[in-house]
Amino acid sequence: MGVMRFQVMPPEAAADWPEAPSAYVTGMDGRVFQGRVELQGNVLTCTRPTSESGKLHVAWPVAGQGRPVLTTASLPESDSPYLLTLELARGKISELRDQSFQWQFAGMSLSPRFEELLREAFGLFSRASACRHDAAAASQFAQQALQAACEAAQILGRAYTQQRRLSRRQSFSHPPALLGCTLDETTCEEPLQSRFFETFTAAVVPIEWSRVEPIEGSYHWAPLDAMVECCQQRRCVIRGGPLLDLSPGGLPAWLAPWAADFLNLQSFVCDFIETAVSRYAGRIRIWEVSARGNSGGGLSLSEEQRLALTARTVEAAQRTDTEAQLFIRVDQPWGEYQAAGGHRLTPFQFVDALLRSRIGLTGVNLEFAVGYEPVGDQYRDLLAVSRLIDIWSLLGIPLHVTLALPSRPEPDPNVGGHLVPGRSPLAVDWSETAQAEWARDYVGMLMAKPQVTGVFWAHFHDRVPHRFPHAGVIAAEGREKPLLRVLQEMQTSGRGQLAPVAEIQGMDQNGTWVED
């Protein structure tokens, strides 16, 4: 049994720290340890079944930056508690140095402001380390170091996006990745139809089993046929699915009695996959065959059963349409859900196992749904997103990314599941403006990554039933959100840039850094 303890200073900070129970520890290979996290007084205790060194990941408040997930350096067990802010600052500064060196070595220019903040952060960290015997003073210096380091990370991430996008624009006359969104009934009529296809180059037709066949043997294809026809008329790239959703409530209710009969369950699943794919063969070339098999929850299937079922669905789709591109969706791609136990494979290993079986899997769709409870992703900065994409790029297959973020704090009456907006981890409360700014950062970074071939927004209109509360591009009352304008700018410019060049501190109109 391994135990790691962290002292929270000042002590009153522990009283307003709802993210503490979501902390987790990873090993050197990135896998999340199953364990228990307890906050007693101002000491955070992480208990694991192993005593090897690990990194703590936890959301922590930083002035001007919200409450992002921060990571310590790899730490061994210690008889005395670590000072939390000091170790978080150490980890962030190390991350900044490593990432900036890699990008600078690849030809990226660093801004004077970034280098100034990095020096400031290291100086404050040094003062914190020198007075660690005085926990209160050390924590104060470390918190200031964190603030400078997180601001530097924001500048570095945006600079990478800007320079990378400008570089790719010189090589490609078209956007480097598809920009898409999920269709609904509202997009089949004007004026929303024009707004949709003016903004997006790809559309997701939501061919989901629970909606298509809510009653066994009774299919509802008409709305989907209309959406496919609309996309064809607009010459828009179509992705269909997810055909199979293995999350809680994602499968048809009538399938529940067959959960204990896995052999027949597979037959039902493959039959639907073959029916759907054959119906739209030649019209839909990209399929998202299954979703959320890595985390699961639907019909209480085991991890082994979910892996086998996902493999069978891909095989069935590939057998039905040998020319189609076949994707699966992975939710919570950082894998923090593993800390609760019940999962032997990391999200990466789950997909890798499918690729090694050579069943015809073409790509993977990573789902970033930030700010939702009880299931969702925590808020991470651009460097964390960049590192995650770099890791998944090692698979050597195309990546799609689906994004969702709430624009309002209250419950959404049109949500079909159990998700609600949680406390905002951003520097501001939930709002439509905050949603748009977050999308500008995330979409910009993702479209700068060569392996990302498609970035998709979760859904279009908040009026129709959807999974993620208040995440739509159009508000329930029909008003366009600022998010729509941001996505349109990215699409029409062909660059997906974070902001006009003039707004990037230290960069001239040619996208190069200049001295003040």
Image (tube, grey):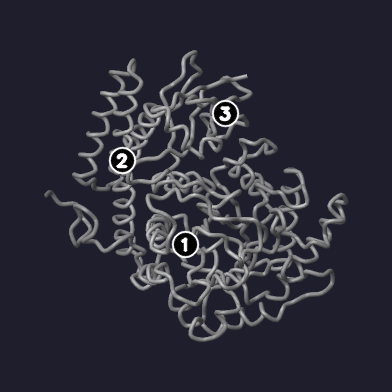
Q: Please give the name of the residue rendered at 74% of the width and 52% of the height, measured from the top-left corner.
A: 298
As measured in the structure, the alpha-carbon distance from the residue carrying label 3 to the one carrying label 1 is 32 Å
- Looking at the image, tell me whether mark 3 or mark 1 is earlier in sequence order: 3
Tag 3 residue: 38
- Looking at the image, tell me whether mark 1 or mark 2 is earlier in sequence order: 2
Q: In which quarter of the image is residue 140?
A: top left
Mark 1 lies on a secondary structure that is: loop
Q: Is residue 112 visible?
A: yes
Q: Does the CB distance between marks 1 and 2 fall below 8 Å?
A: no
Task: Reply above or below: 379 against 283.
Answer: above
Residue 282 in the figure: left or right of residue 172: right
Q: Please give the name of the residue rendered at 67% of the width and 36% of the height, measured from the top-left corner.
A: 344
Tag 2 residue: 100
Mark 2 lies on a secondary structure that is: helix
Residues packed near mark 2 inside 10 Å, few (<14), some (14 to 19) or many (20 plus): many
Image position, residue 323 (x, y; %) = 64, 68
Task: Reply above or below: 433 against 43.
Answer: below
Q: Which of the pair 414/129 is nearer the observer?
A: 414
Please name the amino acid that badge 2 sits on. Ser
Tell which residue pokes out farthest to the top in this image: 79
Residue 267 in the figure: left or right of residue 412: right
Q: Nearer the viewer, mark 2 or mark 3?
A: 3
User: Any mark on residue 407, and which?
Assistant: 1
Mark 3 lies on a secondary structure that is: strand
Please name the amino acid that badge 1 sits on. Ser
